Image: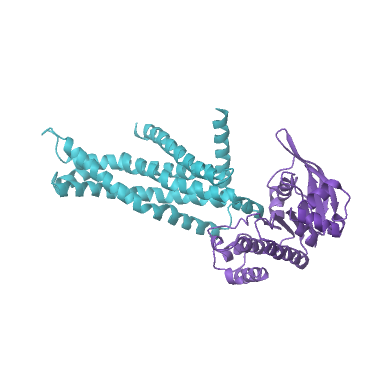
Chain colours: A purple, B cyan
Amino acid sequence: MIEIKNLNKVFGDRQVLFDINAVFEPGKCNLIIGQSGSGKTVLMKCLVGLLEPTSGSIIYSGIDFTKASENERKKIRQEIGMVFQGGALFDSMTCEENVAFPLRMFTDWNKSKIADRVKFCLDRVNLSHAHKLYPSEISGGMKKRVAIARAIALNPKYLFFDEPNSGLDPQTGIVIDQLIQEITREFNTTTIVNTHDMNSVVEIGDKIIYIRKGYKHWEGDSSSIVKSNNPELIDFIFATKLLKRVQKTF
Amino acid sequence: MLKYLDNFGRYCLLIIRSFSKSPKASVMRELIVRELDNLGIGSLYIVSIISFFMGAVAAIQLAANIDSPLIPMSTVGYGTRETIILEFSPTVIALILAGKVGSNIASEIGTMRVTEQIDALEIMGVNSANYLIFPKIIASLIINPILTVISMILGIYGGYLACTTTGLLDGTTYLYGATMDFKTFHFIYALIKSAVFAFVIASVSAFRGYYVEGGSQEVGKASTKAVVNSSISILLWNFILTRLLLL
């Protein structure tokens, strides 16, 4: 479980996050949604430790990450898997080397045990055939799947996804969403997804937090979001003409 | 001025970070071997060509400028050896490597920064500075003195071939001069310089790449800055080391 308490983030004289409070439970897909520039990426970067919050706490299973020692942070980080917007695969390594990377760095496993785990992870994302390919030789959707395989290699307790569907066609986006949901249930991970993809919101949003201008503006789940009376939220989720038509069917 | 001090401070902190908290020894060994291949073997061809012709031109110029019958022609071999060992091989080769290796390091690390690969390392709990920079510094410290020695041999041999093939000087006289009054300390001085320059090239270029912000255009700018900063640092350190070690 991850708890955020009174989180604030200020860059110079500009405050980006205001007093954010939230609880993310294991086995659920927790979505952070919001317009570009709303502060959701900053929130995720604070959660994974790439940015230091100005004030407030981020508690990972009882340990305050913001006040943790370097060793405690390292331990927590080894329980985190993250999938970046562009995949962030190491381009000098093949897909299987990318997945094997955290295993080689943080386990004392022998080569055959690592190879077994890599095979399992690549099979899990249906990419066992691409193990010898380099990131430059595979499609955007495949890169995301390899990144997911790398993220789950160490059996993480916490999984973070930054815009997992950006740059993908809707069908591939659905495949990625299903994969995220399946992995969350299968490994009971606390999954946090940063997105503005409305399909993801409806399909996998067990818990949704809407960030607007740095404030937590709304919290709920996928069934309540479409029935919400919050005007800003409704404007955001039914932004396109197509979605406005769909809204009328609810 | 404050900007320069800030950059210098960040550079020092990054280098300290790169020398702390190594991953498993087997992983680090593998990375160093890979960098030896990337930075060293990859530079062997250009270093060889430049050294050979540098030696050849130095010998011809020396021979062409000795007019007085009072100066023995063996001075050509002596002069070529001294210029090659003292300056050409350690400094000129370092400047060339600053262009080749420095831009390579800065663009590699810079691209990793803008494509979030460094963030991915950090989130996994890997000390990215150590993982990316330390092997490059160690590999450069190992390979640069070796390249410098190869450059010295090829430079002196280039001078020999230039003199003998053009008929400016016979081989025996050149070799007599080239082996005359050899000071071992000059050789050690050259190796010390090449090691210091290796550290400068790897660390300054890595620093420029590590702190890139933006996209591909910024990676290109960082690469250029890496070459310029490394070259200026090499010239400055060349002056300091010469003053400290030779005077």
Say above or below: B102 vs A173.
Answer: above
Instruction: Please state the horizontal and vertical placement of residue A5, each as a whole percent of the image.
Output: 82, 46
Toward the left, the furthest residue is B69
User: In the image shown, does B91 or A41 lie closer to the viewer?
Assistant: A41
Task: Write the residue at 31% across / 39% down.
Answer: B86
Residue B75 shows up from this direction: no
Q: Locate residue B166, reporting x and y percent.
A: 15, 47
Q: Residue at x 72, y 64 (%)?
A: A174
| Quadrant in the rendering for residue A9 | top right
Residue sitting farthest toward the top: B1
Residue under the point 20% across and 47% down: B162
Left or right: A38 in relation to B208: right
Residue at x 35%, y 50% (from the top left corner): B46
Foreground: B155 or B185? B155
Judged left or right of residue A9, residue B212 is left
Q: Front-most of B44 and A30?
A: A30
Instruction: Please state the horizontal and vertical placement of residue A210, each as a whole percent of the image.
Output: 80, 49
Q: Is residue B162 visible?
A: yes
Give the quadrant of the C terminus of chain A. Answer: bottom right
Question: Within the image, what quadrant is residue A222 found in?
Answer: bottom right
Name the spot of residue A11 as percent of width and height, x first: 70, 37
Q: Left or right? Give the position of B143 relative to B173.
A: right
How many badges with numbers are in the image?
A: 0
Q: Quadrant of the N terminus of chain A?
A: bottom right
